[in-house]
Image (cartoon, rainbow, N blue to C red):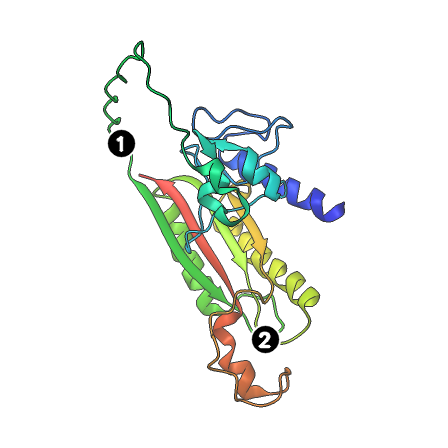
Amino acid sequence: MIKQAKQQLLMAAALAALGLSASASFAKDVVVDAKGEVPYVIDGRNVVARSGADLCWRTGYWTPAAAANVKAGEFPVGCECDADVVAKDKCVATPVAKTEAAKPAPAPLAAPTPVSEKVKLAADALFEFDKAVLLPEGKTKLNDLAAKSKGLKLEVILAVGHTDRIGNPAYNQKLSEKRAAAVKAYLVSAGVEANRVYTEGKGKTQPVTGDKCNKLGAENGSNKKLVACLQPDRRVEIEVIGSK
């Protein structure tokens, strides 16, 4: 229950950053379910926010049922974000039988001319082994990112913490969350509004080193060669979403 409450608070902060509320109806793009719960983070365009890896951002309300029932236009939002958990027949338009009285469909309206340019900025910040303290090069990247974000109509900043594979999953999950929180605190100190930053921890589930460190000996923190090789995994990935 505590974990779910934390997730719901994170969602509320993200939605507040976008000028929305969890009980709002998101125009014609995303329809909230009957309980007013939104399974995905919605950005300023009323569409699902995505990470740099083009993955949809889930909220604490996400469940397979919510992904299959909350609609984006005609189809469930999960058809695009989580196609593996939504029945295929829900993601296919139902053919309409032709009748003599049927009228031809009206010509589609011309798409509105964009009034602003969508901008995404990305960076990452690295950490020492078993630490949640930003390294100097990470601070430099965050200073640059914060400066660039001031030139945008900022919507949201997504910060996702990660760890290397050494250690148990529960410990690494907490450490990844602390790293994401450290990035948020630094961005806020650089002038970014706190309610614009959405954080999440992924633990050791998404390494970027692959198998290149597999033959370096014992899997523990005293193996200096392994610790050095796994440095790219100890990171927070940051994405800034806004418009000019």
- Three-letter code for the amino acid on which mark 1 is drawn: Pro
Disc nearer the start of the sequence (1/2): 1
- Residue 198 is situated, as x and y percent measured from the top left of the image, at 54, 47
Secondary structure found at label 1: loop
Which residue is tagged 1? Answer: 114
The span from disc 1 to disc 2 (Cα, nearest Å) is 45 Å
Which residue is located at x 40 percent, y 45 percent?
Answer: 241
Q: How many marks?
A: 2
Give the quarter of the figure containing the C terminus. Answer: top left
- For marks 1 and 2, give the one nearer the viewer: 1
Which image quarter: residue 132? bottom right
Number of residues whose C-alpha sits closer than 10 Å to that of mark 1, classed few (under 14), some (14–19) or many (20 or more): few
Relative side of 239 to 38, left or right: left
Q: Residue lying furthest top in this view?
A: 101
- Residue 62 visible from this viewpoint: no
Give the quarter of the figure containing the N terminus. Answer: top right
Which image quarter: residue 117? top left
Task: Name the disc covering residue 17, or none.
Answer: none
Q: Residue lying furthest right in this view?
A: 1
- Three-letter code for the amino acid on which mark 2 is drawn: Phe
- Residue 187 is situated, as x and y percent measured from the top left of the image, at 50, 52
- Residue 199 visible from this viewpoint: yes
- Residue 55 is situated, as x and y percent measured from the top left of the image, at 46, 51
111 w.r.t. 200: above or below: above
- Residue 64 is situated, as x and y percent measured from the top left of the image, at 60, 44
Which residue is tagged 2? Answer: 129
Secondary structure found at label 2: loop
In terms of depth relative to the viewer, which is nearer, 6 or 137?
Answer: 6
